Image (spheres, rainbow, N blue to C red):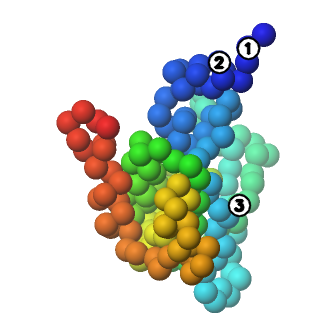
């Protein structure tokens, strides 16, 4: 019979860094991506587009396999929130790298991405950090609330530094 400590040691040894940060079937993620509500005023208009099923062998449309899909118009803005709990320095470096990719429009979201849908990028992103391991920061959080948000760029540069060092962190 395996005990919990032994199982955690096995996960630490055999899971890749990405799985440790973003989760796997065997370990919960330290990063929690919240739903993306539409930001600001929205006319609640969507577009209905047609699609057809394609036979992968013949590369032809399959009869009677028509479907519709709904998309929001281009330039629709969403609110993005990410919560990270109990991260290591390596977790924060990988999260910063992922956010960097979002800022630069390199991460498509949703379905039918191969047809060009889902392109997005973060604009005017800000970050607030609360470190409960630091007693002074915890006291500030409990007495003053969330710290004022800061621009994302400084956070990205600082947190990606372990990935940029010659030893790789």
Tell me the quadrant of the picture where the N terminus can be found.
top right
Q: Is residue 110 above or below residue 6?
A: below
Front in this rendered view, residue 34 or 151: 151
How many angstroms separate mark 2 from mark 1 (CA)?
Answer: 6 Å
**The residue tagged with tag 2: helix, strand or loop?**
helix
Q: Residue at x 31, y 44 (%)?
A: 162
Query: Is residue 121 shown to the viewer in this render?
Result: yes
How many angstroms separate mark 1 from mark 3 (CA)?
Answer: 48 Å
Displayed quadrant of residue 71: bottom right
- Mark 1 and mark 3 lie on one chain; the one further toward the N terminus is 1
Q: Position of residue 65 (x, y in %)?
A: 76, 46
Front in this rendered view, residue 100 or 42: 100
Q: Position of residue 4 (x, y in %)?
A: 71, 24
How crowded pointer 2 is (Cα within 10 Å; few <14, some 14-19, many 20+) is rated as few
Q: Is residue 92 left or right of residue 38?
A: left
- Mark 2 and mark 3 lie on one chain; the one further toward the N terminus is 2
Q: Residue at x 46, y 76 (%)?
A: 149
Displayed quadrant of residue 40: bottom right
Picture mark count:
3
Displayed quadrant of residue 37: bottom right
Can you tell which mark lies on residue 39? Answer: none
How many angstroms separate mark 2 from mark 3 (CA)?
Answer: 47 Å
Front in this rendered view, residue 114 or 43: 43
The residue beneath circle 1 is 2
How crowded pointer 3 is (Cα within 10 Å; few <14, some 14-19, many 20+) is rated as few
The residue beneath circle 2 is 6
* CB under 8 Å between discs 2 and 1: yes
The residue beneath circle 3 is 69
**The residue tagged with tag 1: helix, strand or loop?**
loop
Q: Residue at x 69, y 81 (%)?
A: 45
């Amino acid at each position: 019979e395996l005990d919990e400590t032994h199982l955690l040691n096995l996960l630490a040894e055999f899971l890749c860094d990405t799985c440790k940060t973003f989760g796997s079937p065997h370990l919960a993620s330290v990063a929690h991506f919240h739903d993306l509500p539409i930001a600001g005023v929205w006319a609640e208009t969507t577009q209905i587009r047609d699609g057809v099923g394609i036979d992968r062998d013949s590369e032809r449309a399959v009869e009677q396999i028509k479907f519709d899909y709904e998309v929001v118009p281009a330039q629709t803005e969403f609110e993005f929130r990410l919560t990270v709990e109990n991260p290591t320095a390596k977790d924060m470096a990988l999260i910063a790298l992922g956010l960097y990719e979002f800022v630069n429009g390199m991460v498509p979201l949703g379905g039918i991405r191969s047809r060009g849908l889902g392109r997005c990028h973060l604009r005017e992103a800000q970050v607030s950090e609360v470190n409960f391991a630091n007693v002074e920061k915890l006291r500030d959080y409990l007495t003053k609330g969330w710290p004022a948000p800061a621009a994302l760029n400084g956070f990205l540069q600082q947190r990606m530094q372990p990935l940029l060092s010659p030893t790789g962190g």
